[in-house]
């Protein structure tokens, strides 16, 4: 009985063509390029992430600096307001002090003039008897164009005998741009008595009422004694309102 024969397969050799090799090389190259591009993309993404984080951190830092600057600006503005208030208060105090000094100086000047007036009455430089109008004072009232007036009359020289007479008062100024002089009947309160009778001095008081649009400049005073031995005297006073 014969042994069965076993057939051993012969190896088959497949020869790849040059075209197949080129294709495989191309695919490998493409795959390498894709891997390289992926790596570049990942690296770029990481770099962008770092940039974004840095930008966010930088923006937060800038916001913090802006908030600090805003607080500093607000504090500086508050300090400026306080400084301006202090300056205004100081200026107001200085102005008030200056005004008080001016008022005090005016009062001293007025008192000195009054003292000189009384001294001249009691100890006249000249023996000639004469009458004098002095120390005209004007003060405002609650009504516009209405003013209180006080006029001091005195007798100088002689034996100081009692004298009588009358005072006429007029006001010089501008009315509608033209120079005019308003007579006593036009400006003086009818209740005022312009008659005088005194030995040494006498004060006359009354009210001056000016028409609308009139700008006073001077008060003209004429002293007319009844005695023919005394001369008429004329005086002019600049219009000046005394502060209350």
Image (tube, rainbow, N blue to C red):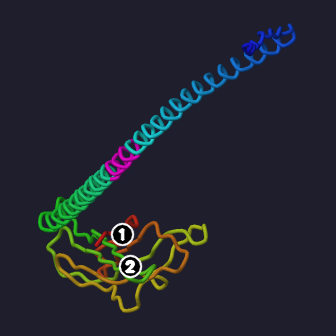
Mark 1, residue position: 241
Q: Nearer the viewer, residue 69 or 60?
A: 60
Query: Looking at the rendering, which quadrant does residue 46 occupy?
Result: top right
Q: Is residue 21 above or below residue 214?
A: above
Which residue: 35% across, 73% down? Answer: 232
29 displayed left or right of 55: right
- The prevailing secondary structure element of the residues shown in magenta is helix
- Element at label 1: loop
Query: Looking at the rendering, which quadrant does residue 111 occupy?
Result: bottom left
Q: Nearer the viewer, residue 94 or 101?
A: 94
In the image, residue 231 lies at what x, y percent?
33, 72
Q: Which mark is residue 110?
A: none
Mark 2, residue position: 147
Q: CA distance from mark 1 to mark 2?
A: 9 Å
Crowding near the residue tagged with mark 1, few <14, some 14–19, many ≥20 C-alpha atoms within 10 Å: few
Whichever of callouts 1 and 2 sits on the residue coming sooner in the sequence is 2
Please state the extent of the stretch shown in magenta in the rendering.
Answer: 69-81
In the image, residue 116 lies at what x, y percent?
17, 62
Tag 1 near tag 2, CB within 8 Å: yes
């Amino acid at each position: 009985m014969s042994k069965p024969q076993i057939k051993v397969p012969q190896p088959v050799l497949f020869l790849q063509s040059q075209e197949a090799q080129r294709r495989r090389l191309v695919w490998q190259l493409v795959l390498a390029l894709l891997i390289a591009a992926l790596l570049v993309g990942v690296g770029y993404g990481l770099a962008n992430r770092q940039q974004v984080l840095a930008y966010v951190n930088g923006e937060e830092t800038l916001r913090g600096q802006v908030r600090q600057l805003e607080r500093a600006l607000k504090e500086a503005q508050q300090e400026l307001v306080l400084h301006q208030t202090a300056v205004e208060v100081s200026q107001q105090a200085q102005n008030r002090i200056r005004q008080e000094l001016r008022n005090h100086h005016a009062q001293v000047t007025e008192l000195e003039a009054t003292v000189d007036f009384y001294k001249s009455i009691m100890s006249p430089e000249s023996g000639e008897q004469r009458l004098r109008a002095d120390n005209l004072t004007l003060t405002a009232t609650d009504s516009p164009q209405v003013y209180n007036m006080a006029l001091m009359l005195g007798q100088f020289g002689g034996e100081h005998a009692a004298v009588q007479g009358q005072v006429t008062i007029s006001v010089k100024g501008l009315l509608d741009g033209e120079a005019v002089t308003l007579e006593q009947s036009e400006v003086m309160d009818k209740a005022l008595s312009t008659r005088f009778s005194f030995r040494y001095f006498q004060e006359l008081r009354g009210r001056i009422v000016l028409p609308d649009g009139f700008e006073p400049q001077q008060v003209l005073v004429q002293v007319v004694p009844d005695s023919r031995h005394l001369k008429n005297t004329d005086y002019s006073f600049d219009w000046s309102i005394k502060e209350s």
